[in-house]
Image (cartoon, rainbow, N blue to C red):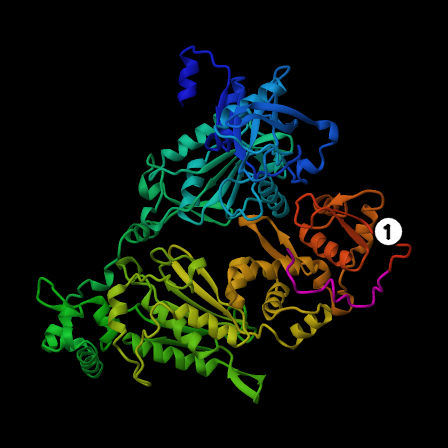
Amino acid sequence: MMIARTLAAGVAGGGVAADAVYGHDGRFRAFCEARRLSYVLEVPVRYGVADLGGRRRDTLVARAPAHAWHRASARPGEHGDREYDWAWATVPTFGDLPAGHIRTLSPADPSYESSKMGYRPRFIGFARGCGARWSTATPACHAHCHAHCHDGEHDSEHDGGAMNVAELADVVDCLRAIGRDDLRIEAKRAGGGLPQGLRETLSAFSNTDGGVIVLGLDEHSGFVATGVGDPGKISADLVDLARKMEPPLRPIVEVLLFESVMLVVAEVPELPRDQKPCFNPGAGIVNGSYIRVGDSDRKMTSYEVQLMLANRGQPRHDEEPVPGTGVDDLDPIALRGYIDRLRSTRPHAYADLDDGGVLRSAKVLVPHETGSVLSVGGLLSLGRLPQHYFPQLMVSFVHYPTVDGAEIGSGVRYLDSIVAEGPVPVMLQEVLRALRRNMTRRAVVNGLGREDIWEYPEIVLREAVVNAVVHRDLSPDSRGTQVQVEMYPDRLVVRNPGGLFGTVTVDDLGEDGISSSRNAMLLRILRDVVLPDDGRPVCENVGSGIRTMVAALRAAGMRPPEFRDKISHFSVTFGNHALLGDDVVAWIRGLRQAGLTDGQCVGLALLRDGDLLDNQTYRRATGVDSRVATAELQNLVARGLAEQIGTKRWTSYRLTVTAAQPPSSAQPADRRAQILAVLESEELGRGEIAIRADLTDVTARRWLRTMVSEGLLEQVGNSRSRNLKYRRADTLFQPSPDPNTTDNTANTDEPGP
């Protein structure tokens, strides 16, 4: 660092003034404070206020008394002296400071994107230091201030960047609740420096879904915040350790004040697939590559390492030659139909070629030292019996009698079982027949009357099995594993070897324009290979199969599919019950909430089943866009039906205890009395009302709007101002709502401002 080298050379510096590029970095501020180097730095104005416990509070400007404001000059500008009203706010430090040194944060004009943080002994010097950073004039004003005591507290619209104290508090609360580390969270004590095992954790997080490392929490004592002795050195050592991984990692490392001690928090992003696996060079790629499983780091198998390496490019295992094969191994009827279809649909490419030329151009036949032989993909698509060469490249189907697959008292292990062999079209046909044979029908009522439908929509089954067969891993190490279809009393599971390929993630599945194929040549052949029973191409919904599947389940009133992506396998699970059955509909009616949308009813049904919802799962289940999903979920929170867990990118929702109770007792909570009590003798802003009444911000907003419309409260100030306050209306008699009467005003489905 330039400043470090300057100081090391003996150059005396009076202080540092810098913009937000430096100011948002807690490590830079810690560096300056450790060397008693005064600074004035810009920090993003969206940073929030936090107290010593690290919990978010109301904005500082609403709490500053009149005597806290002082007028001072920030030096002359283009149009004269720049005088401002300043509030001097002392915020927590990274360590013990000598007399006269404090950390402060200045007010900022709301029209600007940054405020000023200082580490100075004198107030006037701070104001002039701020002026040194302003190269152009700014309007004089009574500026509003957003202060912080940590690094990275952003507003509610922020969904990325460094972790803040509020998010850290959510993470620690989660760890303390479950009593152990989590899939994406690893906590370590780090009392004497970097703890052991960090290389394995860095590798595991970057090879899986990413994660957060928290140093300074004692996992063996219920995740007590013990802190780290030298946060600057610990964070620097962690960054250096990450850079020595292969490929180098660049985690976002922050020093955060939490429960009066300093913690080092590192957010490790997942690597792109074309850079995996990340490993410890000292141990080598096979012994130094890890993935995250549960709350631990597991060393990857050699197959998993090879699969990740293969996924860096386009695999071509489906184009590999199968020695000893030829045209005689192909089904003549399927072959004739395939060649004729190519010539009729793409005459410019195939009309002038003989049959052998067509097969070579389509890579059904590929070169080999013995001459032209069948490719793996050509054999699987058109072969008489591909299992003669690859016995396990087939599909197994098992119908289990119990939800865990165990045998019942009579010794029955399964109700039905088949092994589907042959080319892909025949295997698909046999598995669909087995599914129909084992499915039951259920009755639904529509506008035309009663209709009997299959337990699972057939288009869903077809797409799931086709995807499993076409996108399975065909590398030599996986050719001993079959595609599996398992039916249980409560669900259906389709599983194939090899996880997702390319840039697609579980969150992306079904999104427009998101598609990739591990076996590109096999997929290309199957677009022109038809099913024996209906003449439809095997792969007719290329790139849209998942969307078709999700839409069909939604139309049938069923749960969205559950996708699980592992390195060595991928699975999709379908629940077999109607999401909005009679019991669920009765429960929703018993909530006595007017104006719920169809999407909210679906969301409530999922929450009642014990699911946690986030924006992405809500969108997949309901078909709404991201903006509507957020508004509808927040409205469920405002109604007291859902509880928000976490903030910003960590946000998820669960059913409240009140809503989960039987319909007769699930009454909408009336918050009027709580709000009137906190406004007994003073005017307060919404944030302070929410804190004192122990309400969420969303719930407070909803009830304040309702009580203003009822005449119980009055607004003080501009309704669009962040300084808006509320007070009790000057009425002689204030109505007491009947708890047995549904309040349609407060139960509106309007998400609120």
| SS at mark 1 in the image | loop
139 left or right of 658? left
Residue found at the very far right of the displayed protein: 732
Q: Camera-side residue: 536 or 221?
A: 536
| Amino acid, disc 1 | Asp
The answer to whether residue 690 is seen in the rendering is yes
Instruction: Classify mark 1: residues with Cα within 10 Å, few (<14), some (14-19) or many (20+).
Output: few
Res 8 → quadrant: top left
Residue 585 within the segment the image draws in magenta? no
The answer to whether residue 193 is seen in the rendering is no
Q: Which residue is mark 1?
A: 730
Number of marks in the image? 1
- Chief secondary structure of the magenta span? loop
State the quadrant of the N terminus: top left
Q: What percent of the width, then of the height, locates residue 452?
A: 53, 86
**Which stretch did the figure color magenta?**
736-753
State the quadrant of the C terminus: bottom right
Q: Residue at x 20, y 63 (%)?
A: 319
Q: What percent of the width, then of the height, locates residue 392?
A: 31, 67
Position above or below: 44 against 10: below
Q: What percent of the width, then of the height, locates residue 168?
A: 58, 41
Q: What percent of the width, then of the height, locates residue 563?
A: 46, 62
307 left or right of 606? left
Position above or below: 299 against 397: above
Residue 747 within the segment the image draws in magenta? yes
Residue found at the very far front of the displayed protein: 79
Q: Camera-side residue: 630 or 392?
A: 630
Q: Camera-side residue: 563 or 166?
A: 166
Q: Residue at x 43, y 10 (%)?
A: 10
